[in-house]
Amino acid sequence: MTVLYAEQLLSTAGWLTSVRLHLAGDRVVAIQADVDAEAGDERHAVIVPAMANLHSHAFQRGIAGLTEMRGPGGDDFWSWRETMYRFASRMSPDQLQAIAAQAYVEMLEAGFCRVGEFHYLHHDVDARPYADVGEMAGRIAAAAAETGMALTLLPVFYAHSSFGGQPPKQAQARFVSSLDSYARLIERCRALVAQLPAAIVGVAPHSLRAVTPAELAEVVRLLPDAPVHIHIAEQMGEVRDCIAWSGVTPVRWLLENVAVDERWCLVHATHIDPSEIRSVAHAGAVAGLCPVTEANLGDGIFPAVEFLAAGGDFGVGTDSNVCISLAGELSLLEYTQRLSRRVRNVIGLAERSTGLALYQRALQGGARALGVKAGIAEGAVADLVSLSIDEPSMIWRSADALIDSWLFAGNACVVDCVWVNGRKWVEHGRHLMRDRVRSAYKSAMKELCA
């Protein structure tokens, strides 16, 4: 039994003070509020629930900062994608594991506890299948095991380059599966994560442009109770191509042709109209928002205010991992809404904390999208973050102002400790495996950038 003592703790019932939090195994087994600390208690100023990162391409952490140059013909998502393809085309299994571990260390140090790994780098550099269909997925699982990151593994089905079943491009050859090979990959992934604590496998049709309607139906049926994640309506070029193919937008086509429900996470959904907003919210699908990546790629601004007003749920992800920051994702989500409307405190409720509203909504939506539950309560999984109150932005703050100050005025040093499934992996802001993981990452990047 481990007992943590927190001066302030954000539970599912709200803020508690002077709290003894009893952990056994991976669970919170008891919460005592308004009590004194006892000998042997591990003392912390503030403890809050850790967050799920619902969308990551871990391997893209390796190109962060290497695509910030405008070409002679301009630059957009599609030109960025070609650079990403060239980087992915060279990556070995060892390099993938090293880069994924580095990304997961940074996520944990930021306050994330679980990642939805949208994994589509399946084959060898010559596009031939590995002898083990799950070779690359196994490296993702190994990186999660090494770093303590809870994993929802989302193997991607990718078969076409554009709508209407267009053949894949050569640069996409490492991603491509048949329905048969994808079914084998799913089963292999389930075996690979079986020994990881609380790991989950879902399905991930890459996008409507990468699957045919028949393939989409088959993919969704493979794991009938698991999460389903799909990229959708991220870019206007995608929207125009979908209209040319089907006569309707991507989100409308999906809603009219597939039984979208609470299993689904619609990643980005940036370009979504008012009727689609209401329909997605009514269906119970989670909007998977990645504000930092969406800003970096020039995707556009998701209509979060309208979506929330319709009863929709959202979570956040780090996607391309160009800058891994929990606070950065949530603050940028709010700031883009402010910029588009030219007002302040948009997502929060009247006379309530904007930061707390953002945090709690993303906490619940992100967890649901990854097939788990979130929050600090008796019987719940012990996924926890302690916050330092010694940072200038956190001094003399309490309750809701702690979350506001962390998200809008803090820095990376605000996160002190992180527990995943009851085990502490980050202490004094540093992951326990930081140096070893960084050394392997440095070697991998030296090889890839040579």
Image: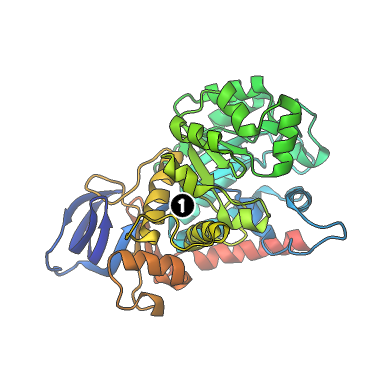
Near-viewer residue (17 or 272): 272
Q: Quadrant of residue 9?
A: bottom left
Q: Residue furthest right?
A: 72
The residue at the point 68 percent across, 44 percent down is 235
Residue 105 visible? The answer is no
Q: Residue furthest left?
A: 35
- Residue 344's x, y, as percent? 46, 63
Q: Residue furthest front?
A: 342
Q: Which residue is mark 1?
A: 149
Q: Quadrant of residue 2?
A: bottom left
- Residue 13's x, y, as percent? 23, 51
Side (left or right) of 264 relative to 170:
left
- Residue 317's x, y, as percent? 53, 51
- Residue 387's x, y, as percent? 35, 68
The residue at the point 24 percent across, 65 percent down is 8
What type is the residue that disc 1 sits on? Answer: Met
